[in-house]
Image (cartoon, rainbow, N blue to C red):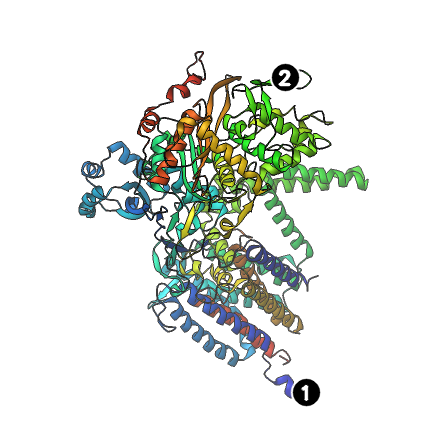
Amino acid sequence: MRKVLLLGLVILTGITFVGRLFYLQLYQGQPNNLEDDNAIRKIYQYPKRGYIYDRNGKLLVANQPTYDVVVIPREVEALDTLLFCSLLNIDKTQFLKSYNRAKRYSPRLPSVFLSHLSKEDYAFLSEKLRKFKGFYVQKRAVRDYQTEIGANVLGYIAEVNPDNLSEDGYYKLGDLIGKQGVEKSYENVLRGEKGVKYIQKDIYNRDIGSYKNGQFDTLPIPGKNITLTIDATLQEYGEKLMQNKMGGIVAIDPSSGELLSIVSAPSYNPALLVGRERSKNYTKLYTDSIYRPLFDKALIRMHAAGSPFKTLVALAALQENAISTKETIYCTESYVYGKNKRTMGCHCGRGYRNLYSAISKSCNSYFATAFRKTIDKHENATIGMNIWSNHIKSFGLGNFLGNDLSVGKKGNIPDGAYYDAWYPDFRWGATTILSNAIGQGEILVTPIQLANMTAAIANRGFYYTPHIIKAIENESIDEKFTIKKETTIDPAHFDPIIEGMHGVYTNGTAGFLKVPGIQICGKTGTAENFTKIDGIKTQLTDHSIFVAFAPKDDPKIAIAVLVENGYYGARWAGRIASLMIEKYLKGEVSLKYMEQLVLNKSLEEEYLKPYSGKPFKINQ
Amino acid sequence: MNLNRANSFQLDWLVVLIYLALVMFGYFNIVSAATDGAFSSYFDLSAPYGKQTVFIGLSLISIVLILSIDAKFYERFASIIYLLSLAALAGLFLFGKKVNGALSWYEIGGATLQPSEFAKFATALAVAKYVSDLQTNIKNSKDQLQAVLIVAVPAILILLQNDAGSTLVFAGLIFVFYREGIPQKYILFGTTVLVIAVATLKFSALIVTSVLAACLLIYQLLLKRKKKKISGPLLVLILCSGLSFGTEWSFDNVLQKHQQDRIELWLRLEKDPEKLRIMRRNISYNLNESEKAIRSGGFTGKGFKEGTRTKGKFVPEQHTDYIFSTVAEEWGFLGSSTVVILFVVLIGRILFLAERHKSQFSRAYGYGVASIIFVHFLINIGMVMGLVPTIGIPLPFFSYGGSGLLAFTILIFIFLKLDANRLNVW
């Protein structure tokens, strides 16, 4: 014992130390990670963010410098506060607030005192800055909008939030990141790669030279410019037409899937989200709960498809051989069905209807029959519904389109399982779910899905995934946008449908929307619109919906318009669609009277009705 | 037995090699830790590493001197060396220079000398001499008292100069006495006192006393002793609770604030995470930074002169007491655990050599050398890694400082000289 006590203690100590070293260095240790090493100062050099152009090469978004006043509190000496405040255009309370905040953060480190100084303010200040010890000016680049349109398309950039930071190690606190629109979906292309310099610093936070002679330092790689498929002129026109209304317009070039315009109304000037007033403006936009300008109505406003959906019901019925183009039914302005003699109203005017006139007059009874026949062909409704649902979904409905936009919604196209869950043991049939035949019921779509569906009809059976990117500097766009997506419908079945849609313009529900010299095919839609007021389901004025494409034989544009609470389809949505088509195809508008009518119409009153607290009338 | 071999000069090369390895490795770490701005030259006398070059040179010269002096000299002159060192310590009160609050230095023409470093080997020699004296019987309590005095006088002088760390080193000499035969119960008693004191600080005197009372009660019941003998355990209980409450009282009233804080951190007494964070930042700032540096070393380390935390001077006192954090940062787990293993082998080898000796003086001195190095090793590296409360004490051969390096060199090489002559009959 006497001989081994000390030896034992020495060995025990040795083992404990090696164990502790193991714990500290191998278990807890993160060796040589420059990014996390706070003995190394990382100085980032930000690259130029890529510019954004429209399809015709018009510059939409560029960059501008902005100046932040930065303060290092412990370097500050007694100063002429009055002069300083007047130079920066702030008052003394704000001065103290910012100064104390900086001091609380760290007396030794620079923190932003006042951000986004204008060029003029900066010019004034820079002359006098040497008088104010401890204050510096830091240059940053922000977006410079060359246009007042397309806020929802272009999106905006803002400082990263904690989620962005944890998702992607590239970003550091205070970095800017695309938050919406193409700024978000093409963030990786636009941002470039920032350069970094590693500087060894000491305990007092002083720089004591570059780390390993700068062998790990990198230079910034500028962001790439991108060209959008958006036609700025058309986009601007669409936004103008939608003024004082709520809703969305999506226009697609069917031959390529390029999105010509995505209008969400009401919109806002994208420049509002840049500069010193940014957060004030953002709050204002964000808190507008009636118009919700930040909510892209063209991409994520889900609504009942309404009558444009009848074209797909007809196509599915033709494909399944449930109807033929020659069959005729007699419409009595109401369709009676089921054991309980339920009725579905129809506004087509009494008479014989074949496929052509059913589409042009939008006859509910005809499509109710066609839908029932399609479903009832099969041994049970589940199978029939699944087959029907597959046809409909092949037009890009009921699922994400897989496009390159920052937001989107699936919408809803029910299938057999969907109703089996509602009504077990097959206690449902075609008549139970008949409202689907006219685009009501469980059918939910977004304007961009409607536009895409119209493009697929215009192409007679295929579409390209709608996309907003036309070109990226020195890089090709995603291959998936050049791959044709076929629908499940035989191309031969499209001709009668297209004839019917042409009939809508020549002698149907949109007869007064003709555009001289252009053969347009369209389909009106009126979707019922419900909301909840104090928990009670209340009906509001119908949504006005319209889809169209033109020219009939060589389609250049397919368009869907949603005007919320706009009443019947041809009323506002139809007018806007015709004007947009003329504007795009001819470059100017001849229907001046119609244009004035649309521009002067405000639906504000409609939108305020549910908030008035008083009883109101709808569909006036 | 071969007489030639017996008379020959037999240096233990293993100890020499480890010594050289530690000194050289330590030197490079000082170069790293003490480089402020640009590195000038290994012989730049204005920089710590330049001075250390000189100290290493002096140490090598002292090795030659020590080995050339007759081995008997050290035993004969042990008392005189001891008395000289006491005089040097006492002289500090008159001529000493205060650095960092400790009155431990002489200043002679720009160079400084720390006599407490030399007092270590002097005391080890004196202790060895005393226990090996034919008239000393270490089992005799009067002799024990004298032995304690030999250790206590320099220890108290150093304590009075406000260098608590160095004082602790002398306590390590208990291992010498234990090896040479003081009763087992002293060690047992010391261990008990230590355990009760630490347990009291961690759990409070009331809890410790209650637990002890419960244990003694169970012991009493299980052994079914005669009832008369209850007074013995009762006495133990009273003494222990006295010690326990005494510890608590002296923690509050005797210890200085910074010492209290260090113990609180060591035993993790502060439960409020916010307060703990502030304490860690303010009080154990050094430890915090040193642990960060150690962690950042990883497996292989950042390389010589590439430690970012060392370069940025994030760990205060890094080239002196916290030099091990430089080792760990720049040489990683590989380097730092090698150093730990080298120390263990060095001390183990010295103990082995000491046991081999026939001469009681040499054996006792060997144990003294081993204990002194062990206490430094234990406290310094333990402190740098947060296992031991912060006590300022250098790491032998590594920490910057001429007196320390020279004193440790003398300490070891006197032993090697004794060892080389172990077969000579005196």
- The image quadrant of residue B299 is bottom right
Q: Are marks 1 and 2 on the same chain?
A: no
Type of amino acid at the residue the image marks with label 1: Asn
- The image quadrant of residue A263 is top left
Give A231 or A181, whichever is nearer the viewer: A231
Left or right, B208 with reference to B230: left
Give A438 or B229, whichever is nearer the viewer: A438
Pinpoint residue B91: horizontal percent, then vertical percent.
40, 62
- Report which residue position mark 1 lands on: B2
Residue A171, can we see it? Answer: no
Label 2 near label 1: C-beta < 8 Å? no
In the rendered picture of this protein, how many numbered marks are placed on residues?
A: 2
Label 1, label 2: how far apart the Cα atoms are: 126 Å
Q: Secondary structure at mark 2?
A: strand
- The image quadrant of residue B126 is bottom right
Where is the C terminus of chain B found, in terms of image quarters? bottom right
In the rendered view, tell whether residue A401 sits above or below residue B68. above
Where is the N terminus of chain B found, in terms of image quarters? bottom right
Q: Report the residue at 64% width, 84% height from top.
A: B6
Give A256 or A505, whichever is nearer the viewer: A505
In the rendered view, tell whether residue A41 sits above or below residue B282. below
Give B216 or A180, whichever is nearer the viewer: A180
> Which chain does the numbered disc 1 sit on?
B
Pinpoint residue B16: horizontal percent, then vertical percent.
55, 75
Q: Residues within 10 Å of mark 2 (few under 14, many from 20)?
A: few
Q: Secondary structure at mark 1?
A: loop
- Residue mark closest to the camera, 1 vs 2: 2
- Report which residue position mark 2 lands on: A342
> Which chain does the numbered disc 2 sit on?
A
Left or right, A580 with reference to A451: left
Type of amino acid at the residue the image marks with label 2: Arg
